[in-house]
Amino acid sequence: MRVSLKDVASHAGVSIKTVSNVVNDQPHVTPAMRARVQKSIDELGYRPNLTARHLRKGRTGIVALALPELGNPYFAELAAEVVDAAAEHDYTVLLDHTGGRRDQETLVCQGFRSRVIDGLILSPIELEADDLRERAPVPLVLLGEREYDLPYDHISIDNVAAAREAVRHLVSLGRRDIAFLGARRGRSQPAHLRLRGWREELDAAGLVADDRLVAATDGWGHADGAAAMARLLDAGHRPDAVFAYNDLIAIGAMRVLSERGLRVPEDVAVAGFDDVVEGRFGAVTLTSVSPDKASIARMAVQSVLSQLDGAPGQQARRVHAGYTLVRRESTLGHG
C-alpha cells in the first residue's frame, strides 16, 4: 500500500503542510521538526511522487541528452554520468542519438520533444549558429568542441591546453616527428582545437608542425585511425610519435603499427584523448587525456536547472571542466 503525506503527518503528529515542506526541502522548518518528520518518513517507507512534484512546478522531470555517437565509449561513459547527475535532482534523462548528422541535430534542437522535456543537453557536430538561433524555447546547454558566438551555456574542457600537454609529454621523451591523426576532411571543426594545440606546442618547442604528418579521417573510430596510420606509412612519412584526436583513432593506429613491425612506444609513441576504458586494458595501455566526465555532467545538469529556476536573459557561460594527462605504456613503455 502506498504511503501518503497524510499518513506521514498522522504518524509524526504534524500538519500535511509541514510534511510537504520537509519533503520539498523548504526553508523555515526547524531542525527538530525536520528530524521528527524525517523519522516518520523513514519508518513508514514514504516515497515522494516525483511526477506530481515536477507537475506542480509546471515541469516534466525529463532532460534530453543528444549525443553524436553512442557507440563511442566516451559518449557512453558521459551519458552514464549525466544520468547519475540528473538522478541526484530527481530528473530522468531522455537519450537521443544524432549520429552527428545535421538533420538529426536540427530536429533535436528545434524542439520535436519540447513538450516532454524541461531542457536539452546537446553535443553538436554539424550544426551552424543559424540552426541554433531557431531552437525550441527550452533551456539549452552545449557540450564539446564546436564553438558558437551565441548566448548559451557551453561546458567543455580546454582542448587546446589539453592537446598541448599531451604533445609536450611526447616532446619531453625526445620525440620530434609527431603526427596528428583525426583532422576532418574539408572541415575545420570539431577537431580544430586539438589540432591547434598540436601546432602551438610544436612551435613552442622549436619543432616543425609538418602538415604532411596531419592525417585526415572520415570518422573517429578504430578503422579511421588504422586507415590514417596506414596512409602516412605508405606515403613514406614515419613519425616517431602520434597524437590522436581520440582513443579509438589511437588504438586503430597502434594496430597498424604492430602489423608493420613497429613497436609502441620504442619506435612510435602514441597518445590519445578521452581516456576510455578500452585504452586501459590493451596489450599496450594507452596514454590519454582524461576529461573530468563527472564534472562535465554535473555542470551540464546544473546549468539546465539554473536556467529553469532563473530569470530570463541570464548571462551565458563558457565553463571549462578539468582534465588530466594519464601517462601509460604507449609512451612510457613497460616497467
Image (cartoon, grey):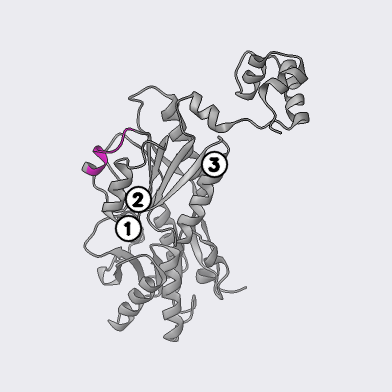
The picture places residue 293, in percent across and down from the top left corner, at 50, 49
Other residues around mark 2 within 10 Å, as few (<14) / some (14–19) / many (≥20): many
Nearer-N-terminus badge (3/1): 3
Label 1 to label 2, Cα distance in Å?
Answer: 7 Å
Residue 93 magenta: no
Q: Residue 295 in the image: state x and y as whole percent.
A: 51, 44
Asked where in the image residue 235 lies, by quadrant, the reply is bottom left
Residue 294: % across, % down: 53, 46
| Alpha carbon distance from label 3 to label 1 | 27 Å
Nearest to the observer: residue 278 or residue 89: 89
Q: Measuring 33% from the left and 36% from the top, which residue is drawn there?
A: 152
Q: Amino acid at mark 1?
A: Ala
Q: Is residue 135 magenta?
A: yes
Give the image quarter of residue 315: top left
As drawn, 87 above or below 9: below
Tell me: 200 left or right of 23.
left
User: The residue under label 3 is which amino acid type?
Assistant: Ala
Q: Does residue 328 sit above or below 192 in this rendering?
A: below
Contact, CB < 8 Å: mark 1 with mark 2?
A: yes
Disc 1 or 2, which lies upstream in sequence? Answer: 2
Circle nearer the viewer, 3 or 2: 3
Nearer-the-camera pick, 73 or 232: 73
Span colored in magenta: 131-137
Q: Earlier in the sequence, mark 3 or mark 2?
A: 3
Say if residue 324 shows up in the picture: no
Residue assigned mark 2? 145
Q: Which numbered dot is residue 191?
A: 1
Residue corresponding to mark 3: 85
